[in-house]
Each structure stands twice: as structure tokens, then as C-alpha cells.
Image: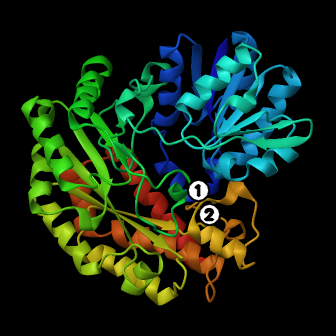
């Protein structure tokens, strides 16, 4: 059997002036699936079309050339229309190729997708590593898909949803991701990684016990599972020695949920000397760090921390069930800076209840707490999130133009969510203003040019120039 896994691309032009900062990121999910298939002697390849930009024609050529039997495609909301088009083309070429979709969007809308798209054979729900392995084996042995847990498929016009599969308990039983099947030397984590490549991802845990209403990860699994610190450090050593990795980014939504786990990891990094060979970044909550943990992280090679702060207003933070105080956020950033770790604030504009003044307050807060980076995303009710469910249930939201479900969108007509009392133009202008006001300050420009030096000077200047132009254009409208 020949299996092809695909990470689809989508239209970067919709990002407008922000598309300059979009860079391919490591596809760790597909790399894990490929690793399990390879471990079981299944011939598998991966196309990361966000990086290769082959398009439908190029992908079809590879399918023909490689004589592929099974195609598995990751289907997130913005890429969904392109995925449906690609699957249709694949079936037109060879109807005997088994087409499998996975990831959040495909899982949520499995019945709609299977009903409307005859070209889609199977949809995977939940974590896909062992599900995909079973699908390939059943297809090869001409057996019954109904015996595979956590999938949906159509038989005689009837959609069958099999019983749920329990989340994988021992994450350390998974083989290391098959990075050799991907263009790993091209990956970055802009604007959050430094110049040196390669940059790869690593997973230390899965699941998140929190209930932020904007997060679609709630659909996957709230059950928190963690890897052993020793196993994570072993994998980092492997990546350094086998792939020449200079930087790593943890994909965990929270590093680390328990302080003692973070301290143990840092201790082992230092003991193995890996803190001198690789730098790493992570994302966590502001209420999950203290001076002791931050000091250990800095000594262990942590370069940068992403904090999901979301808003500069306590009422807005409470509304989205983020459940921390702004005072805690300020203290976390102060402590991070004291330990020499760079800080990234992740903010959202157009949250439920947001006004022009509350968004201005968010921008001011981002500047006042002296972050090194700030990212201001437009709020999007992604399928799988509580926000999406609430809006659909109340009848307030009926948008299904999935390609426009983007947190950076340059066209006011394409914005999918606009809180009451605001306009699409005001949201786009506020996003431009946020980045303009934050980054085009003398101390930030100086810091990025002479201290942080994350982006090459040419790209940095072009990025600043595009921000200025886009801001001027929005002010003229």
C-alpha cells in the first residue's frame, strides 16, 4: 500500500499586508501519523503544500507518479473549500483511491461533508495516529470499516459513525515524528523564532482542562496527558543530533500545567547539556509561571514565551472564561523579563462585548506591560469552540464561507464575526492600528534591530514599511 498525507495550503492573499509574516510551520500532526505508519512497514509520503505550493495539479501529478492507494488530508476550517476541491479531483482521476479527511473541521461537520461530497470516503475523529493505521490495514485486507473506532463513513447512502476511541494515554509509546518526510529545513516560527534554522516542533502533552470560549481544541480532548520529562529530553537530543535542530517550539497549549513537571524537564535539559545546544519557545498561561520556574526555564534554554492574554479589560477576560487577573498578567511579564526571557502577548480584537474603547484599552495594555512582541488577532468563532456553538444556537451566526475564517483578514466584506456596535471596517482599522502602535515605537524598533534581531534586517524593514502603508490606507478610507 502507498499512502500520501497532505497538509493543504490556503489563500495567503487574504492576509493582506500581514502575509509577509506568514511562514511554513512544522506539521507535527501528520509527522506523527506517518511515523506510526512507517513503524508498521507502510510506505508513506507527506506533501506540505503550504510550503511546496504545488497546488491541485502538482499534487495530482505526484499521486499519479507514486501510484497512491490512500490519501489522508488534514482539514482545518480555512482550508476546507480547497480540500473538498482537491478530493474531487483525486476521485475524478482514480475512484479507487481511498480518501480520508481528519482534523477538527472534518470531524465536526462529518455528516454534512459525507452527505455533500461523494469524493470523501472516511472522516477520522479525534487523534488520528492509530486510527489511520487501522484504516490502511482494513483497506488493504478488504475488511469492514465498521470495526474501526472513531470514524465516519457512508455505506449505501447511510452515514455510519463508529464508537469513540479513548484518547491515547501513554504519549511516549508514539514513535518520534517522521520529520525526514517533510521539508524541515524550511520551517520557522515567525515572528517567534530566530533566524537560524532548522526549527522543529515538539509535543510534551495533549489536552487542556481550561474552557476558554474561543478555543476549538475543546472539541479534540480536554483530558490532559503528559509525557515523561526524560522522554521529551531524549527526543530533543535526537532532533539536535539527527536533524541539526537549533530551535524548538513546544506545541502544548500550556507549558507546563504542573510546575514540578516543568522544573524536572529543565533540570534534565541542563544536566544533559542540551541547554547549550538548542533554544526553545513555548506557550503558557500567565497564572502558570513564577520566578522559580522562569529562572529554571531560562537556564534550560528557553528563549521566548507566548502568553495568551487576549484583552486589556478584565470584563472581557472574564467573558471569555480565561480566568486570570490583569495584575497576574503584568507580574508574569515582569518576571519573564527579569529572567532574560522574551515575552509574546497574544491578544484578540472584536471579542464578545468589545467596543472601540475596550480595544484601545487592549492596545494600551500591550504597550504598558512592555512585551517584546504582540500579536493582535481578529476574533473568529471557529467551529468546535463554545463561542461558535453559542452563536449558532442563538441564530446569530450562519456563515459557512470557511475560507474567510481567518484571524487576519484584509477585506471588510470577508470578516465572519462582528460584535454588536462595531463595523468590519472598524475592526480591520483597529487591527492595523494595534500593530502600528505597538511595533512602530522607537524603543521597540531599537530592541528588534539591535537586541532581539529575530528577523533579518531586510524583512524587518519591509515588514515595518508594509505596516505603515496599510495603516495609512485604512486611515484614508
Q: Is residue 190 visible?
A: yes
Q: Which mark is residue 410?
A: 2
* Residue appearing at x 39%, y 79% in the figure: 362
User: For the residue labelled by badge 1, is the local secondary structure a helix, a strand or a loop?
Assistant: helix
Q: Are marks 1 and 2 in contact (CB under 8 Å)?
A: yes
334 lies left or right of 69: left
On the image, the x and y values in percent for residue 31 come to 48, 28
* Residue appearing at x 79%, y 36% in the figure: 120
* Residue appearing at x 46%, y 74% in the figure: 433
Q: Considering only order in the chain, which callout, 2 or 1, is on the residue closer to the N terminus?
A: 1
88 lies left or right of 230: right
On the image, the x and y values in percent for residue 159 come to 83, 43
On the image, the x and y values in percent for residue 406 come to 60, 59
Query: In what quadrant of the picture does the C terminus appear?
Result: bottom right
Question: Which residue is the site of mark 1?
Answer: 15
How busy is the neighbourhood of tag 1: few (under 14 within 10 Å), some, or many (20 plus)? Answer: some
Amino acid at each position: 500500500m502507498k499512502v500520501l498525507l497532505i497538509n493543504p495550503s490556503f489563500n495567503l492573499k487574504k492576509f493582506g499586508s500581514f502575509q509577509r509574516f506568514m511562514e511554513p510551520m512544522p506539521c507535527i500532526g501528520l509527522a506523527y501519523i506517518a511515523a506510526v505508519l512507517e513503524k508498521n512497514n507502510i510506505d508513506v509520503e507527506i506533501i506540505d503544500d503550504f510550503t511546496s505550493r504545488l497546488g491541485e495539479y502538482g499534487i495530482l501529478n505526484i499521486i499519479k507518479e507514486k501510484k497512491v492507494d490512500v490519501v489522508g488530508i488534514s482539514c482545518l476550517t480555512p482550508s476546507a473549500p480547497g480540500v473538498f476541491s482537491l478530493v474531487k479531483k483525486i476521485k475524478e482521476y482514480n475512484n479507487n483511491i481511498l480518501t480520508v479527511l481528519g482534523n477538527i473541521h472534518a470531524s465536526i461537520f462529518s455528516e454534512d461533508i459525507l452527505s455533500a461530497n461523494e469524493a470523501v470516503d472516511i472522516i477520522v475523529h479525534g487523534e488520528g495516529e492509530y486510527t489511520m493505521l487501522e484504516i490502511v490495514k482494513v483497506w488493504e485486507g478488504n475488511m469492514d470499516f465498521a470495526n474501526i473506532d472513531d470514524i465516519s463513513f457512508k455505506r449505501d447512502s447511510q452515514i455510519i459513525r463508529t464508537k469513540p476511541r479513548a484518547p491515547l494515554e501513554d504519549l511516549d509509546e508514539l514513535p518520534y515524528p517522521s520529520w525526514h518526510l517533510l521539508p524541515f529545513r524550511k520551517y520557522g516560527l515567525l515572528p517567534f523564532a530566530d533566524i537560524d534554522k532548522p526549527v522543529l516542533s515538539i509535543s510534551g502533552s495533549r489536552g487542556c482542562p481550561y474552557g476558554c470560549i474561543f478555543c476549538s481544541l475543546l472539541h479534540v480532548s480536554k483530558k490532559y496527558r503528559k509525557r515523561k520529562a526524560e522522554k521529551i529530553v531524549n527526543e530533543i537530543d535526537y532532533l539536535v543530533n539527527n536533524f541539526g535542530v537549533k530551535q524548538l517550539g513546544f506545541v502544548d497549549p500550556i507549558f507546563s500545567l504542573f510546575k514540578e513537571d516543568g522544573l524536572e524537564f529543565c533540570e534534565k535539559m541542563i544536566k544533559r547539556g542540551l541547554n547549550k545546544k538548542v533554544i526553545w519557545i513555548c506557550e503558557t498561561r500567565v497564572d502558570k509561571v513564577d520566578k522559580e520556574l522562569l529562572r529554571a526555564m531560562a537556564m534550560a534554554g528557553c528563549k521566548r514565551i507566548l502568553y495568551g492574554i487576549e484583552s486589556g479589560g478584565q470584563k472581557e477576560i472574564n467573558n471569555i472564561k480565561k480566568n486570570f487577573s490583569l495584575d497576574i498578567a503584568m507580574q508574569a511579564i515582569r518576571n519573564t523579563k527579569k529572567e532574560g526571557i522574551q515575552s509574546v502577548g497574544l491578544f484578540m480584537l472584536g471579542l464578545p462585548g468589545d467596543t472601540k474603547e475596550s480595544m484601545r484599552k487592549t492596545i494600551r495594555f500591550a504597550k504598558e506591560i512592555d512585551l517584546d512582541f504582540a500579536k493582535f488577532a481578529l476574533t473568529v468563532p471557529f467551529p468546535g469552540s463554545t463561542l461558535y456553538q453559542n452563536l449558532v444556537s442563538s441564530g446569530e451566526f450562519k456563515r459557512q464561507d470557511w475560507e474567510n475564517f481567518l484571524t487576519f483578514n484584509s477585506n471588510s466584506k470577508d470578516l465572519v464575526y462582528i460584535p454588536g456596535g462595531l463595523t468590519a471596517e472598524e475592526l480591520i482599522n483597529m487591527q492595523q492600528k494595534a500593530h502600528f502602535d505597538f511595533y512602530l515605537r522607537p524603543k521597540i524598533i531599537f530592541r528588534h534591530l539591535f537586541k532581539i534581531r529575530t528577523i533579518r534586517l531586510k524583512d524587518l524593514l519591509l515588514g515595518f514599511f508594509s505596516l505603515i502603508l496599510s495603516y495609512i490606507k485604512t486611515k484614508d478610507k
